[in-house]
Image: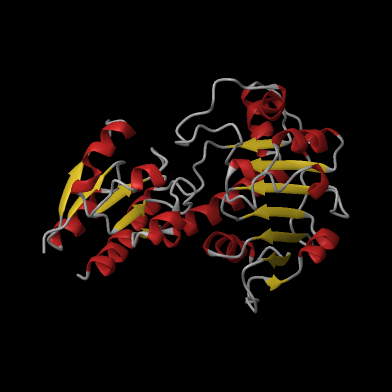
Amino acid sequence: MNYNILFLDSAHPCLQQLLEEAGYKCEFDYTSTLVKLAETIHLYDGLVIRSRFKLDSTILDKALKLKFIARVGAGMENIDVAYAESKGIKCLHAPEGNRDAVGEHAMGMLLSLFNNLCRADKEVREGKWIREGNRGIELKGKTVGLIGYGNMGSAFAERLTGFGVNTLAYDKYKKNYSDRFATEATLERLFEETDVLSLHVPLTDETLFMVDDSFINQFKKNIFIINTARGKVIKTEDLVKNLKTKKVLGACLDVLEYEDVSFEKLKSELNDSSNYLINSDRVILSPHIAGWTVESNEKLARVLAGKIKTVLGK
């Protein structure tokens, strides 16, 4: 049977190649509006998307043939998964494809923060040779608390091996997941012992602004925070408040509350909180690229191709 698959966002070329080798027809539309898509979505058996559109019940009701939606990435917040699956549409993603990239990026950000590398690099380029002011701290002996222990959390835990840290992981939706990289722990234990908090949760109603002032101040110690998950897991205003008091000693943020829904740009109306982050040398920022490597680009595509072929029976 011939299946028609529409790519709404770009992906590594091997995804198209693998799907066409399996006998599927691939079409591409990177420019049409959601209104235009509503007129043609009934023609397709599958969609490939990153974050260009939100696919809600209104558009999904017009998808009369749709068998799957494949997201080239990990998060699924731009898809109404429950509604899609109630209509028999499989929702696929590929966290296996960029887990290594996210783990390495989180590791790199943390080491840069602890050793003042961004600030020191800038100073040396300006002709400043400041040693004492850039004295770093070591990871060894610290407790790293992970919230979420799926592909991303476990990849970061694996990278921490060898640094002499104590890695604790809290995951509300798992049991008995201790392994050689991390120890299963309660949230209360994380509050008691954590030096470095790293977030690895999807954006849901439950995690929206989960890390707010009240949450931060349940930690016994002053902490560092890493966020490679989604920007809106952290309430930025409250993060800044606690950076100012040094309850949060520093932050590594690959994602920001102020990202556009497509993740392709920042919203234009930056405020005092976002400006504080931009100007603080205790904050390291990157533009939502933790999972964005040359290797992960291809791995995401290959993982999705396998899952799509399983859904379509090839």
User: Is 237 placed above or below 72 here?
Assistant: above
Indicate left or right for 46 with 188 as reference. Answer: left
Question: Residue placed at 88% from the left, 55% from the top?
Answer: 220
Question: Residue placed at 22% from the left, 47% from the top?
Answer: 42
The quadrant of the image that shows the C terminus is bottom left
Q: For this rendering, which residue is in front, 120 or 112?
A: 112
Q: For this rendering, which residue is in front, 21 or 56?
A: 56
Question: Residue placed at 40% from the left, 61% from the top?
Answer: 86
Indicate left or right for 264 with 138 as reference. Answer: left
Q: Position of residue 228 (x, y in %)?
A: 58, 48
Residue that sits furthest to the bottom in the current view: 176
User: Is 126 placed above or below 59 here?
Assistant: above
Q: Is residue 22 visible?
A: yes
**Model colouring:** secondary structure
Q: Position of residue 108 (x, y in %)?
A: 59, 49
Q: How many marks?
A: 0
Q: Is residue 115 visible?
A: no
Q: Position of residue 166 (x, y in %)?
A: 74, 67
Can you tell which quarter of the image residue 55 is in?
A: top left
The quadrant of the image that shows the N terminus is bottom left
User: Is 146 placed above or below 9 here?
Assistant: below
Question: Residue placed at 43% from the left, 49% from the top?
Answer: 79
Q: Position of residue 276 (x, y in %)?
A: 72, 26
Indicate left or right for 211 with 262 as reference. Answer: right
